[in-house]
Amino acid sequence: MLKTETRYGIDPETAKTFDTDGLRRHFHKEGLFQEGEINLVYTHYDRLILGSAVPGDGSLVLDHMDETGTPGFLDRREMGILNIGETGTVEVGGDTHTLKPGELLYIGMGGGPVTFAGDGRFYITSSPAHRHCPTKLIKLEDARRVELGSRDTANERVIIQFLHPEVCDTCQLLMGYTQFAPGSLWNTMPAHLHDRRMEAYLYFDVPEDARVFHFMGTPDETRHLVMANEEVVISPPWSIHCGAGTAAYTFCWTMAGDNVDFGDMDMVAMSDLR
């Protein structure tokens, strides 16, 4: 029912030496969403955990993970749960929350065991927490929307912010997703860095015959990963993170680190990319 793995931190000089297999082994994750399983990846980047729960016909309970070193998973952690499937439920602290497609549930430190049920495909992220914040179900109409880009530059998109200071109180998790308009493909170009925070990306709503090219690396040593539907990239703080798809797509972004300032970015000039 519970499968886990650990990803260790990689410095930029070491990353320069990786071939495609090496990059994918350290920064890419596929096969997360398996029916009847909870799959979790414990990263050494700000101790972020990411993963999935697909209950199928039964229910799944997340209560303990050896890698956290605590009796309960949420004893010293907070959690964000995004439903990318059909309607499902998440039970925590004696309350059952119904998540429709595209909705997100925040669970604060000390929440206790978490039970997943229904037809949802739940994407899970979790970071260490230092205080309790109230559990909150955030519906689409409650999220913060930021429209950016244009068709002329092939990046017309809407950023839907759920775990954001103006929407939900958290310790360090920031989380939401970005949807592209038909015909738009490019995300976050010019690129940027934020060495104070790491980031992870789940690419979803990617057509079966389409791919997203996720760009990473230092600005003067860029690399790329080819992403299919429901695959994840772990993005180190020293790396750029931008992408382009062969069709419109959606991606969920999660950040953890020193602050919850979404605009804390160090922009990279197009002329500095190599």
Image: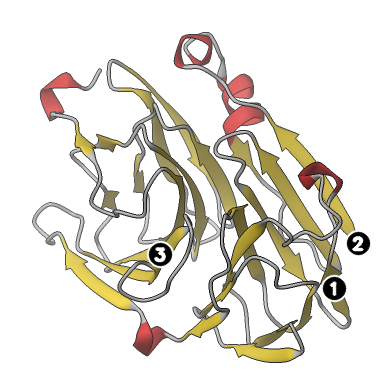
Residue 1: assigned label: 2
Q: Is residue 45 above or below residue 247?
A: above
Left or right, residue 5 beside residue 18 = right
For the residues marked 3 and 2, what is the alpha-carbon distance in whole angstroms? 27 Å
Q: What residue type is disc 1 on?
A: Leu
Q: Residues within 10 Å of mark 2 (few under 14, many from 20)?
A: few
Q: What mark, if any, has residue 108 been given in the picture?
A: none
Mark 1–mark 2 distance (CA, rounded to whole Å): 7 Å
Near-viewer residue (95 or 31): 95
Percent x, y for residue 221? 34, 15
Mark 1 to mark 3 CA distance (whole Å): 25 Å
Quadrant containing the C terminus in the rendered view: top left
Label ID, residue 177: 3
Which label's residue is closer to the chain start, 1 or 2? 2
Type of residue at label 2?
Met
Image coordinates of residue 197 in percent, x first then y, are: 41, 40
Q: Which residue is mark 1?
A: 60
Asked whether disc 1 touches disc 3, contact meaning CB atoms under 8 Å apart, the reply is: no
In terms of secondary structure, where does tag 3 sit? strand
Residue under the image location 29 percent in, 76 percent down: 144
The residue depicted at 71 percent of the width and 91 percent of the height is: 96
Residue 146 vertical position relative to residue 14 in the rendered view, above or below? below
| In-front residue for pair 163/245 | 163
Which amino acid type corresponds to the residue marked 3 in the rendered image? Tyr
Q: Earlier in the sequence, mark 3 or mark 2?
A: 2
| Residue at figure coordinates x 51%, y 80% from the top left | 103
Assign a secondary structure to mark 1: strand
Q: Locate residue 29: give its quadrant.
A: top right
* Coordinates of residue 75 in the picture (x, y in percent): 74, 60
Question: Given contact means CB atoms under 8 Å apart, are the residues at marks 1 and 2 in contact?
Answer: yes
